[in-house]
């Protein structure tokens, strides 16, 4: 898989996990969900995301 596919998979998983945590554990988890959304939004314009840099360091194909 490529960096982009891993990024979408990780972001989707994190959004679903934080939504569940916000519902069942503590509503403050919704702030992390918002952070993920804002990060995806800014990466659409800048083509840079911290997770992409991490995945590239781990050797995932671009």
Image: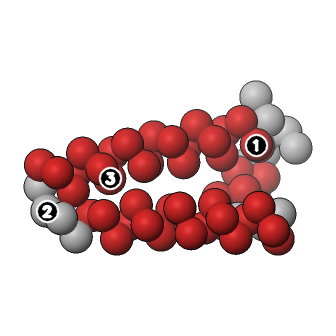
Tell me if residue 21 comes above or below residue 46 in the rendering: above
Query: Colour mode?
Result: secondary structure
- Do labels 2 and 3 touch, CB within 8 Å? no
The quarter holding residue 32 reads bottom left
Question: What element does badge 3 sit on?
Answer: helix
Q: Which residue is mark 2?
A: 26
At x 27%, y 64%, the residue is: 29
Q: Which residue is drawn at the image coordinates 43% and 48% (left, top)?
A: 14
Gap between marks 3 and 1, in whole Å? Answer: 21 Å
Q: Dividing the image into 4 quarters, which one contains the N terminus?
A: top right
Residue 4: give its label.
1
Closer to the camera in the image, 62 or 34: 34
| Among the 4 quarters of the image, the one containing residue 8 | top right
**Viewer-closest of 17 and 59:** 17
Percent position (x, y) of residue 5?
71, 36
- Mark carried by residue 44: none
- Residue 20 locus on image (x, y percent): 24, 45
The residue lying at 63 percent from left, 60 percent from top is 40
Q: Which residue is mark 3?
A: 18
Count of residue discs: 3
């Amino acid at each position: 898989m490529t960096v982009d596919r891993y990024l979408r998979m990780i972001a989707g998983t994190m959004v679903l996990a934080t939504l569940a945590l916000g519902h069942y554990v503590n509503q403050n988890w919704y702030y992390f969900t918002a952070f993920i959304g804002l990060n995806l939004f800014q990466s659409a314009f800048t083509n840079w995301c911290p997770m992409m840099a991490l995945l590239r360091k781990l050797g995932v194909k671009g």
